[in-house]
Each structure stands twice: as C-alpha cells, then as structure tokens.
Image: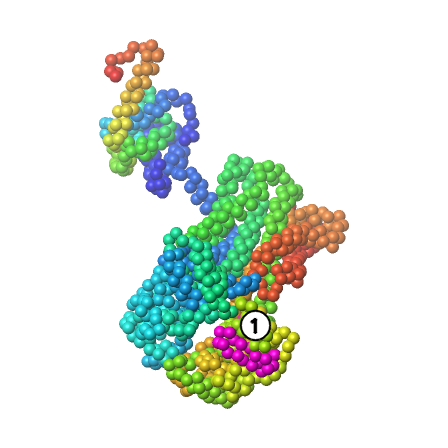
C-alpha cells in the first residue's frame, strides 16, 4: 500500500511473512518481540522495515495463519499477542521449503558450494 | 476481506492504535535502558517505526470495500450539502413526490384493474359470449343473449366449452323481519353451473345443483358475503334458514366467499343474492328468442380457442335465425375475454390518466435536473478546484448521482404515501368502477416505485451532468467572474429542458381542456324535462302478495292519491323508468297501416309505462293529441303516446294520431293517441324514440314515483316513504334521489377524468412557470454586470426589459408550438372519452395557448423587470 520503497535491502521481498511465522514457532509473542527476535537472530543484519510489521501481521491474521489475543506483556502492559495456528504451521513448512529451494538455486548460480544442511 | 472486517474496521483500528502505542513504548524503554535520554529514546523509536498514521491508514484501506466506502462518503456529503440549502431540497423533493406519487397511484390502478387476472380458477380460459344486434356500425357488438339461443348453444357446444348464463340485473324486495327494515336488493339469476364454470365454490354451504335449477324446485338462494354480514350479522347457522324475497320463502343454501365478485360490462358487482334462473324466470322467457336478458360465460375446454367457439356458435345461431323469422332474433354471436369485458370501459381513461401522470413525472424530473444544473453552476469553482486536485470525473459524477438519488428517494417515499392516500380516496369514491375492490399496493408496486426512483435519479443526474465537460471545468478556473460563457451554455441546456417542459404542459392542458369542455357539455345536456326539484323513488309489488293486476292497480292509485295530497307536492306520477335513469327495456314495433318490414328491420322503440299524471308531473310537453286517460287501463289500455322522434321514425310525414303500432314480441296492437316531447334515458347517450303505454293496463308491478315540488323536494322523501310503509310495511323503497343527483351520478366518470387531468395540467403549468422563472432569474444574475454596463452606457429601461422578456419567452413559444403539434397528434386517442366535443376543438387550443402565454409572460416579467431596474453602480460593484 503505497509504501516508500527505500533500498533497505536487508529484507528480501516476501520473506517477512515467513520469518514472522518462524518466530512464532517458539511461542506466542507481541509485535515488538517479533521485530526484536528477527533482528537479534539475524545478528542485526535484518531490520524489520518501517511500518511493515503491522500490515504483515494483519495480513497473516486475515488468512488465518495466526490468531491474536490481548494479554499482559513481560512488564505487565496490555499487549496484543499473536499465536501460530495449525494452518500457519503448514504454511510455514511450505514457505520454508520454497525458500530453501530458492536459496540453493541462487547459491548454485553464484557458484558457491551448497552446505550439507539443505538435503532436499 | 470480509463484510465482518468492513463493519468492524473502526474497532480494529483502535486496537491497532493500541498495539502501535505498545510497540513504541517497548522500543522507548529499550532505548532508555541503553542509556539514551528520554527525548532521544522517543525520537529513535519513532524513526524506527515510521509513521503510525500511515500504518493505520494502510490497514484501514485494506479493511474497506472502496466502492461502498465512496458511496457512503458521497451520501454523507450530499446529505450535508442538501441540508445546507433546505429550500432547494424541499422544493425538489415535493416536485418529485408529486410526480412519483401520481404515477404510483395510477400504476397501481392500471395493474390491479386492467392487468391482474380475475380472481377465478384459470381465468385465462374464461370468456363472455354475446350476440351482435344488427349490422349497424354504431351498435354495441356485445349485447345480451336470449335464453332460447343459449339452450341450443349449450346443447351443441359441449365439446368446445362449458357454458353458463347469468342475468345480473335482477332484484328482490327483502321483507322486514325481526326488526330489520324491508329493503330492495340487487340480485342475479344464474344457471346452476354458473359458479362451477367460474371455478368458485361457496364459503359456507353448497352451490346450486341441476335439481335446484328447474321450475318446480324448492326456492333456493345463495347470499353474497357482504349481504350475509350486513343483514344477518354473519350468522354461522344461516344455511338451511328461510328468508323472504318478494314475499316468498327461499332457503339459504350457501354464502359466497368475501373475495368473490362477478362484474362485467353490464355490471353485476352489486348482486347481494343469486338465485337459480329456471326457477325464477317465467317459462316463456326461458324459451324465447326475442327477449335478450342474459349474459353467457364460457370456459373453453383445453386446446380450444375463442375463435373456434365463436364460429361453432355462429353456425348454430345462423340456423336459429333461419328457423325463427321474428324480427327480434339475432344472427351473429360475439365474445371477448371476461377480463376485457369487465374493464374495457375503463381502459382508455386509465391509460390517458397514466400518460398524463407520466408527463407530470417527466416534467418533475426535468425541473429537478434543471435545479441541479443551477447548483452545479453555482458550485462550478468548487468542482473545478476538485478536478484540478485530481478528483476523478466518475467520483464527481457519482456525487451528483447520489444527490439526485437522495432527492428522488425522498420524493419517492413521500410519493408512496401520497399514492396510498390517493388510492384510499379512489376506492371510497368510485364504487361504480368494476374491480375497484382489487386495488391495493403490493410488492410489485413497491418494486416499481424503487425502479421509478432510480430512473428519476439517473435521468436528472445525467441531464445535469451532460451540461458540463472537462474543458469547461478548467475554463471556469481561468474564467474571470465577469465572463459568462459557461453560464450561458448551462442556461442553454436549461432552455432546451424548458421547451420540452412547456410542450408537455401544453399537451396536458389541451387534454384537460377537452375533457373539461366535454364534461361541461354533459352537465348541460337537456334531459328533455326540467331537472330541478324532482324527486324519484322506486318500488316493486311482489307477485306473492299482489296476485291480481286489479289489486296492483288499486295499490298504485291509492298511493298516488295520498302522495298528491301531501302539502308541497305540485304533481306526482308513475313511470317504469325516469329520464336519465337507464335503458329500462325496448321493443321492436311495426306500423299496422304500413306494408310489413323485411326481417331484422323492426322499429326499435324504448318502452315506458306511465300513468296519466306522469307527463304533467315531470313536465314532458304534449305536442299533439292527448295523454291517455285514467280509465284506459287493463283490457281497455291499448292506447299509446309516442315521443316526437318516435313519430318521425314510424310515421315520417304523416299524422300519427289514430294510427296503430304492433309490438312484435307481445303480439299486441296499440292506437297512437298523442305525441310528447323527447327525453334522454342516459345523460351521455343520444335521445332514443320512446313509446309510452298505460301503466295500469300492463300488469307492471314495479314503478318509479316522480314527484315535483316548488322547492326543497328532498323534504318530501320521508313523508312519502311513511305513506308507503303504512300501506305495506314489507314493501321497501329504493333509489330515492332527485333528478339532479341522477345527473351527478351519471357524469361522475367524466367529472373524475376531467378533474384529475386538469389537476395534473395545473401542476405541470406551475412547474413550467417555476422553470421559466428560474432560468430567467439565473440569466439575470449571470448577466448583472453586463446589463449594468449597458444601462450605464445609456440603454433604455424598456429595451432591457424587452430583451430579457424575449429571452425568457423564446423557449415558451417554441414549447407551445411543439406542444400544440404533439396535442393535435395525440388527442385522437381520447376521442372515445369526449362527449359532443371534437378532439381538435379550436376554442380549447386557443384558450390553452392564451393561458400558457399569460402564465409564461408573468413568470418572465419579474426577473426581466428586475433586470431593467438594475442600479448600474450597484451592478458593476457586484463582482
């Protein structure tokens, strides 16, 4: 929706949804935690693009991949928590497979050796 | 994307706002923990998150059907702009309400009366069969049938159709009983298979059987629901009880459902009871071929057609006519669908009224469109700026559409109320109309209302939208307010609308003028007698109590003597049918002194039976000879008085006195003793030659008393009824009315049509005048500065006035010419509604033109005069 497409190339297009779903595998979380987890685990390489987190969450909820509820955050503030649904788990598997194929394909093109972790 | 989300988007947005807040606080706390100052922590958090507003708007948009959202916004916006100019809104809504209301009302009537099927089983196969009397061009081809022919038809057409007959113009005296007054009721004789042929069964009890429908059977009667409710208070045990009709006991065997009504072109809708015909009618009437007293209904068997049935019956009828050489026997059969038979008489006038309301609606739309054009012109700057800022043409159009939709739906809602009131009024005032009881607003009508509303909205919006284009919008940004080209173009379009409006108005005015003139003619028709201060009332002596003709004559004589003795009575007499109160029977006669006429060419004279006092009481002038005397009665009563036109018809160029007339169906010869003036049997029909015979000589049991007084004849009704009540408490009196009321009753149709069309025409005229005034007033405001300059430069007031007047009158003149042309082409369609008035009556056309010009002139005068009085200084300053 009319977002400024800054060359904040940290985030590969279409991967935010997948990463949000992945973060939720470890447990329910609210928006700020999700953003933080993505940044931390990527060793601060990936930064969740300005203002794109909430539309993404909204979209995922709309499709039934996550559900949400109001709860208390770690420091006892009212916050909206997101939870991965069964459909979301399936979607995550699909997306992960797709991503691995893609990553391997790109690596092949770039002439790099694939590591053993992708076993097809 | 779901509707749920759409309707919950406000809540979703608040939640999102909370969430974002929470995110920002968390981020700030983290930044604070890293040792930033409060301000820096806050700034960083916002930098990281971006614009919360934008996020919220994004999500909001996602939750929205944009089309509906736009519509809702337009609706809100239009409602707001309309409430800002309530005057405009109220006027436009009222105009629409009038147009839509009138149309809905007429549409409902047309649908209920003309289009909806009759309330019988499989009504598409029901037809009414008639005989065609003679070959003349102006005879009604759908005339009643004789029972003799019917019997033969029924025998031979059993393989084509089921036939039944009914005689809907009968009546009975109901005796007084258990405190109820005696009364006269309308009734119908019918063959036992009449109800089965229609496919209806009584709600209570049983229908007639062939057993009931023969001369020697026990007397049976079926009641109408209304009569049962009114006179017997819905007595559930009525079946099997006896009621007294014409002083004889009848067993009630059934009550019809309240929804049942039978009415054709010869009426029948007022029947309170039905009796089996073979039991009621004298046996000669059941076998004669010369007395036409019945209507025949037919239900076609599957796969048969009306044409097939008619050709079959025509063959039978031709044989009958060959076998029976009497002059009254008919030789052609005719028929039409039962629905046509019931409503044929109303078709023209209802469709004429519907087209009148159509014109009014069109004018109303044109007026609203033209109001919208003015508003658009007034807002042209605003619109231009919005266009320049990227407002799409479609968006601007949809806003205009919404505005006109609001107006027309307001008008439609009000119009539906109006229609509802109008229909309630119509059903109350027009009992005489067939099928009036079927009129009601149903789902289809409401649907049609919605359709009309949408159509009007589209029509007005499109016309006003057509008045501008993109170029103009840009131009109006550049245009200084002194220029007025765009204004003129808009006024040009409005002028075209005005021409149309005026033309339609002229058509309506001409129609109204013609109908009004015809109504006037009808009101002033000469019945043949002075109509003021004449009272009539009708009674009939039942066979069962007055067996002997001498007994009947004695009753008549005693009664009329007592009536004549009442103070205030100038004259009183009896007649079988008073002038203006209906056909009341005719006979074919021949002149004894002349050579016999060829078959089928008898002289048709209307038959009246009167006592000698009748002629002086009602003041029919005696032209020649004498009136019959009191002792010319019973077997000495073979004398007759004929009307002037009868004398001309039967005895052209001869002296009729002393000649003899032979009535073919009675085989009686009458000597002509006198000639009197003509009278009309119906106000809207031409005079018919009449033949009077002495009442006392004929065994006539029913009569109309005619009473003339110097003044206030109505006050005599009660005393006369009292006298009758004293002489026979079981004898009801009916049709108590003055001759004036008779005329009013028989002109109600014409009055109704002309008043309604006139009302529509006046509305149209007002709308057109308002339109003319509006356009010219608008032009004057647009040209204020120009006129100011002209006046400053020395233009004469008179010149300015004339120029402006001409400007305004031009569309009126053009519309007048167009309208006169259209009227000339269309008035032929209402020819059948006009009485002694030519469709192209020049006086009506001239009067309409004059009236239109005067009204248009007045409408234009005010703005033109205002323009000529402009103070140039003031005008030049108004920028």
**Residue of label 1:** B596
> Who's the residue at 40% across and 59% down the image?
B157
Which image quarter is the N terminus of chain B in?
Answer: top left
> Who's the residue at 41% across and 31% down the image?
A1
Front-lying residue, B457 or B668? B668
Q: Locate residue B603: give its quadrant.
A: bottom right
Q: Is residue B209 left or right of residue B740?
A: left
> Who's the residue at 51% across and 49% down the image?
B456
Front-lying residue, B511 or B649? B649
Where is residue B114? Give x, y as percent.
Answer: 46, 58
Q: How many residues crowd around disc 1 within 10 Å: few (fewer than 14), some, or many (20 or more)? A: few
Q: Secondary structure at mark 1?
A: loop
Q: Is residue B155 left or right of residue B818?
A: left
Q: Locate residue B616: give its quadrant.
A: bottom right
Q: Is residue B174 left or right of residue B583?
A: left
The residue stretch that appears in magenta: B656-684
- Vertical placement of A58 versus B213: above or below? above
Q: Chain of mark 1?
A: B
- Vertical placement of A67 versus B438: above or below? above
The answer to whether residue B677 is magenta is yes
> Visible in this render: residue B847?
no
Where is residue B879? Give x, y as percent.
Answer: 64, 46
Front-lying residue, B228 or B456? B228
How is the structure coloured here? Answer: rainbow
> Who's the residue at 39% across and 56% down the image?
B160
The answer to whether residue B733 is magenta is no
């Amino acid at each position: 929706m009319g977002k400024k497409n800054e060359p904040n190339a940290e985030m590969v297009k279409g991967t935010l949804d997948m990463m949000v779903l992945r973060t939720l595998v470890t447990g329910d979380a609210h928006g700020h935690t999700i953003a933080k987890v993505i940044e931390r685990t990527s060793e601060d390489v990936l930064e969740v693009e300005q203002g794109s987190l909430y539309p993404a969450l909204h979209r995922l909820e709309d499709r039934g991949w996550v559900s949400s509820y109001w709860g208390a955050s770690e420091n006892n503030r009212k916050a909206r928590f997101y939870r991965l649904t069964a459909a979301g788990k399936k979607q995550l598997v699909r997306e992960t497979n797709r991503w691995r194929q893609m990553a391997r394909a790109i690596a092949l093109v770039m002439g790099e050796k694939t590591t053993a972790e992708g076993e097809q | 994307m779901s509707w749920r989300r759409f309707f919950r988007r406000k809540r979703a947005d608040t939640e999102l706002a909370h969430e974002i807040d929470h995110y920002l606080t968390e981020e700030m706390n983290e930044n604070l923990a890293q040792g930033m100052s409060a301000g820096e922590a806050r700034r960083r958090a916002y930098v990281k998150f971006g614009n919360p507003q934008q996020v919220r708007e994004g999500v909001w948009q996602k939750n929205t059907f944009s089309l509906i959202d736009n519509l809702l916004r337009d609706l809100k916006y239009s409602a707001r702009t309309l409430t800002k100019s309530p005057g405009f809104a109220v006027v436009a809504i009222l105009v629409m309400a009038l147009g839509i209301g009138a149309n809905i009302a007429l549409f409902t009537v047309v649908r209920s009366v003309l289009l909806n099927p009759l309330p019988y089983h499989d009504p598409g196969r029901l037809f009414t069969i008639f005989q065609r009397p003679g070959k003349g061009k102006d005879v009604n081809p759908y005339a009643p049938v004789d029972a003799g022919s019917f019997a033969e038809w029924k025998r031979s057409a059993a393989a084509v159709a089921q036939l039944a007959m009914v005689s809907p113009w009968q009546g009975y005296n109901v005796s007084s009983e258990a405190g109820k007054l005696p009364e006269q009721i309308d009734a119908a004789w019918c063959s036992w298979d009449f109800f089965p042929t229609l496919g209806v069964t009584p709600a209570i009890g049983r229908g007639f059987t062939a057993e009931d429908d023969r001369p020697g059977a026990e007397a049976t009667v079926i009641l109408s629901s209304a009569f049962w409710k009114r006179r017997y208070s819905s007595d559930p045990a009525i079946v099997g009880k006896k009621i007294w009709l014409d002083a004889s006991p009848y067993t009630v065997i059934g009550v019809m459902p309240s929804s049942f009504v039978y009415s054709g072109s010869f009426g029948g809708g007022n029947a309170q009871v039905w009796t089996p015909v073979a039991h009621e009618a004298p046996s000669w009437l059941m076998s004669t071929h010369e007395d036409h007293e019945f209507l025949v209904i037919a239900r076609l068997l599957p796969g048969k057609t009306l044409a097939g049935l008619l050709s079959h019956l025509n063959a039978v009828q031709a044989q009958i006519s060959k076998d029976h050489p009497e002059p009254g026997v008919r030789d052609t059969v005719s028929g039409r669908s039962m629905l046509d038979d019931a409503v044929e008489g109303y078709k023209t006038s209802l469709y004429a009224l519907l087209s009148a309301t159509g014109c009014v609606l069109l004018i109303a739309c044109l007026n609203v469109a033209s109001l919208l054009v003015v508003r658009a012109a007034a807002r042209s700057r605003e619109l231009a700026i919005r266009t320049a800022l990227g407002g799409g043409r479609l968006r601007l159009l949809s806003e205009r559409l919404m505005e006109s939709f609001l107006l027309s739906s307001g008008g439609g809602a009000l119009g539906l109320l109006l229609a509802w009131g109008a229909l309630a009024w119509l059903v109350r005032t027009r009992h005489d109309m067939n099928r009036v009881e079927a009129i009601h607003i149903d789902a289809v009508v409401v649907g049609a209302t919605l359709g009309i509303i949408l159509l009007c909205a589209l029509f007005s919006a499109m016309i006003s939208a057509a008045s501008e284009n993109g170029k103009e919008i840009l131009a109006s940004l550049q245009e200084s307010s002194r220029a007025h080209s765009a204004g003129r173009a808009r006024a040009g379009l409005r002028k075209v609308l005005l021409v149309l409006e005026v033309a339609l108005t002229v058509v309506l005015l001409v129609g109204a003028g013609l109908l009004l003139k015809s109504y006037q003619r009808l009101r002033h028709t000469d019945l043949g007698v002075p109509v003021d201060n004449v009272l009539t009332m009708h009674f009939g002596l039942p066979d069962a109590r007055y067996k002997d003709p001498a007994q009947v004559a004695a009753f008549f004589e005693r009664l009329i003597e007592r009536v004549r003795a009442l103070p205030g009575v100038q004259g009183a007499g009896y007649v079988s049918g008073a002038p203006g109160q209906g056909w009341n029977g005719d006979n074919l006669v021949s002149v004894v002194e002349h050579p016999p006429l060829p078959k089928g060419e008898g002289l048709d004279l209307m038959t009246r039976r009167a006592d000698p006092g009748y002629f002086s009481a009602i003041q029919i002038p005696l032209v020649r000879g004498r009136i019959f005397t009191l002792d010319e009665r019973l077997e000495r009563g073979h004398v007759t008085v004929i009307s002037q036109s009868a004398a001309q018809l039967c005895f052209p160029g001869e002296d009729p006195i002393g000649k003899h007339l032979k009535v073919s169906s009675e085989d009686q010869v009458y000597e002509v003793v006198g000639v009197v003036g003509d009278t009309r049997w119906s106000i809207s029909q031409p005079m018919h030659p009449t033949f009077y015979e002495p009442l006392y000589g004929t065994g006539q049991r029913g009569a109309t008393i005619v009473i003339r007084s110097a003044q206030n004849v109505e006050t005599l009704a009660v005393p006369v009824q009292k006298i009758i009540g004293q002489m026979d408490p079981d004898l009801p009196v009916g049709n108590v009315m003055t001759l004036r009321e008779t005329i009013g009753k028989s002109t109600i149709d014409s009055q109704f049509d002309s008043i309604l069309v006139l009302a529509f025409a006046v509305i149209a005229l007002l709308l057109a005048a308002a339109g003319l005034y509006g356009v010219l007033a608008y032009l004057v405001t647009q040209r204020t500065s120009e006129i100011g300059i002209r006046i400053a430069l020395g233009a004469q007031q008179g010149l300015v006035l004339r120029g402006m007047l001409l400007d305004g009158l031009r569309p009126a003149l053009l519309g007048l010419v167009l309208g006169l042309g259209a009227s000339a082409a269309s008035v032929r369609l209402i020819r059948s509604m006009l009485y002694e008035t030519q469709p192209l009556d020049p006086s009506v056309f001239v009067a309409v033109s004059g009236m239109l010009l005067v009204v248009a002139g007045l409408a234009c005068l005010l703005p033109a005069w205002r323009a000529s009085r402009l103070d140039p200084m003031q005008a030049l300053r108004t920028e």
